Amino acid sequence: MKRNFIISLLLGCLLVSCSDYQKLLKSTDYEMKWNKANEYYEQKKYQRVIDLLEELQAIHKGTDRAEQTLYMLANSYFNRKDYISAASYFETYYKTYPKGTFTEDCRFLSGKAAYLNSPDPRLTQEETYKAIEELSVFLEFYPNTDKKEQVVKMLNELQDKLVYKQLLNCRLYYNLGDYMAKNNYLSCIVTATNALV
């Protein structure tokens, strides 16, 4: 009996808190939304931050809050492990605010998001190339950064991934041999030679 009461009480609290959040989303009180977004950000409730800031981003455009809104939105996506959206918002930030408060951090996190989104070597490596480019540009802009060691380590891992991808390609051609009357050994040699260049 007591257990059922406690469960009912918890469910009631959950429903009330959900309905308060739904009311907040439908509200036109943008100041309250901004304050709650900051509160949720501090509490690491990143999905709620994203929901609120997606709307506030357009409203804050051109104001003194626009920069922080964009940074918090990008960082929330990053913390939710949506690295594609995070990289996109970080890139938007550093292109919009090239001398902004968070520009260095956004350039770094954009590269790190692409690094974390880099796929297994057996798959296409477009994201790996993007990560290498982003991290290399970061080092060009900030050669004396305290993140240099971390960036170099990520770059080395990405390069190793590309080398392994080339090895897998060579192995594939070698294993195919004369399959379907094609000289795949020649393709293996060409692929290996291109990898060495």
Image: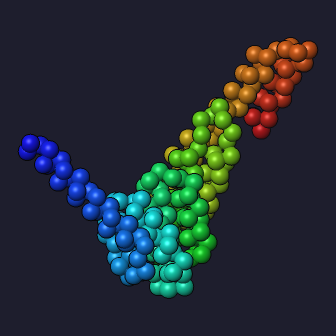
Please give left or right for residue 127 compared with residue 65 in the image.
Answer: right
The image position of residue 123, as x and y in percent, is 66, 35
Q: Residue at x 28, y 58 (%)?
A: 15
- Residue 84 in the image: above or below residue 102: above
The image position of residue 38, as x and y in percent, is 35, 71
Q: Name the residue furthest bottom.
A: 63
Q: Residue at x 54, y 85 (%)?
A: 62
Give the image's coloring scheme.
rainbow
- Residue 103 in the image: above or below residue 30: above
* Location of residue 176 (image quadrant): top right
The image position of residue 182, as x and y in percent, is 90, 18
Q: Residue at x 53, y 59 (%)?
A: 86
Please give left or right for residue 173 compared with residue 46 in the image.
Answer: right
- Residue 35 in the image: above or below residue 185: below
Q: Residue at x 44, y 53 (%)?
A: 80
The image position of residue 142, as x and y in percent, is 54, 65
Report if residue 58 is visible in the image.
yes
Q: Name the residue furthest front.
A: 1
